[in-house]
Amino acid sequence: MSQRPIKEEIHWALTAEAGPKCQKLDETLDVDVLVVGGGLTGCRTALGLAEAGTSVALVDSHEIGWGASGRSGGQCNPIWRQTPQQLVEMLGATHGETLIKTTLTAAEDLFSDIKRFGIDCDAVQAGWIQAAHTKKARKNMRTLGRSWAEVGLDIEELEGRAVQEATGSPAYSFALRHSAGGHVQPLSLTRGYARAAIARGASVFERTPITGLERVDGKWRARSGSGEITAENVVLTTNAYSNGLWQGLHQTFHPLVSIVLATKPLDAVQQQEILPGKVTISDSRLAIYFARYDRDGRLIFGCVGSSDNVDAFGGFGRAKRGLKTVFPQIADVPIERKWAGRIAVTPEMMPHLHEPAPGLLAGIGFSGRGIAMTSVMGRALSAKLLGTTTDELPFPILPVKPIPFHGITSRLVPLAAPAMTLKDRFDSMTNGV
Ligand SMILES: Cc1cc2nc3c(=O)[nH]c(=O)nc-3n(C[C@H](O)[C@H](O)[C@H](O)COP(=O)(O)OP(=O)(O)OC[C@H]3O[C@@H](n4cnc5c(N)ncnc54)[C@H](O)[C@@H]3O)c2cc1C
């Protein structure tokens, strides 16, 4: 079927609530806290601080939500890739137990924030289906699901026909249904947090890249063009768009890419069969396939990509083949838009909280689990600045430790998506469900 050229355009920007009107910084400002990075992490951090009466400025190089937060699949997938026991082994008993407790309420906390701050972001809490694409993945997923169910998450195992009925996909025969999962319009959510922060007194500046950060007379001085902000504390929430503002930070993760396409709205019959009830899905592939609806019934489908250009290394073609694999019944559905964004993947696929200097914090590395977990981090960052002790936080404070040979490995990132796809295909052929 021939189709008009598909626009490379972020779908969420066309359907989002209007953003707050924010100026570029061209003055000198003195605040308690400067937050650098206007994505979900930065906006939630600024909101927590403003709510507590702290004077806070939030800046972004571009617009609020310009980074991953405004490009995201928007799925609230509120567990980690590790079992609770692995978290305790990885983070130690104190932080591990706190993180487990925080994780149990992460989805509820997100959806109740949305209500509490009156954020209009098409929020739907209809569950998330996590599907296994191989026998090995089924075994691991079963272990993961049972371990989280034991500590209190509502997780149901689905087998055979039940998976197909719950997802409309013939591609899987085992899955976990997480009842707390859901989805949001991610740009509207980010803008909503920013608006709520402004309403509580935060100053927000757009088109304000911070180009220099130095310690002067016991305070931080941040420069951006003709503007300057002096702050007791600075929080870096620049995630995969970190650009060397703090030495070594951008070398603590690999900037992988996720690409997304939006189909034409599916008709009512298709919507009853595919992801019925607006449940979301993501799977166990390395080049993870994920899908959900937008508010108008478009299927939003994504996978791992290679660069900011969706088509690089055949990215868009791979996404379309992925759509056909997961939902063959709509293989020929017209695609309206495609886009890409960067995710920060840490070696252990867990976010990092850093305090590389006095009064300087960074919360980055969500490894593709950012919709609920950026709020967990944002709340932790603001709590730390408001006096919560390090031991009470869900994340330990880690040193900024660059990944060995980062210069070489990060240059190979564009090849990761095709390589992962090949491995996924091989695994499906040799170990498929
Ligand atoms: C395509 C895609 C799909 C995804 N799908 C999902 C999903 O379905 N579910 C899920 O849980 N997660 C998903 N994620 C991950 C999730 O969206 C991210 O983890 C999350 O949005 C990260 O938010 P953040 O605020 O930490 O970073 P970002 O939203 O990336 O914000 C960082 C901001 O920092 C700014 N910045 C950088 N340097 C400077 C500077 N020097 N001065 C000022 N500003 C600066 C940038 O302009 C940027 O706006 C997806 C990500 C992508 C890209």
Image (cartoon, helix red, strand yellow):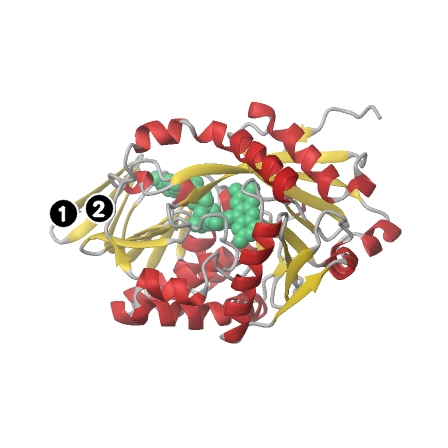
Q: What residue is shown at x 36% (from left), y 31% (from top)? A: 409
Are the residues at dot 2 and dot 1 in contact (C-beta closer than 8 Å)?
A: yes
Q: Residue at x 62, y 36 (%)?
A: 425
Amino acid type for the residue under numbered disc 2: Arg
Residue sitting nearer the eye, 84 or 219: 84
Residue 123 is at least partly visible in this image = no
Q: Residue at x 53, y 65 (%)?
A: 110
Query: As drawn, is 62 to the left or to the right of 276?
Result: left
**What number is the disc on residue 381?**
none
Disc 1 residue type (three-letter)? Val
Report the residue marked by disc 2. Answer: 221
Label 2 crowding class (10 Å Cα cut-off): few <14, some 14-19, many 20+? many
Residue 181 image position (x, y, % from top left): 61, 63
Residue 131 in sight: yes
| Quadrant occupied by the N terminus | top right
Instruction: Give the answer, above or below, for where 36 lies relative to 319.
Output: below
**Label 1 sits on residue:** 216
Dot 2: element: strand
Q: Nearer the viewer, residue 82 or 44?
A: 82
Q: In this view of the protein, which residue sits in the foreground, 230 or 395? A: 395
Q: Position of residue 299 (x, y in %)?
A: 73, 46
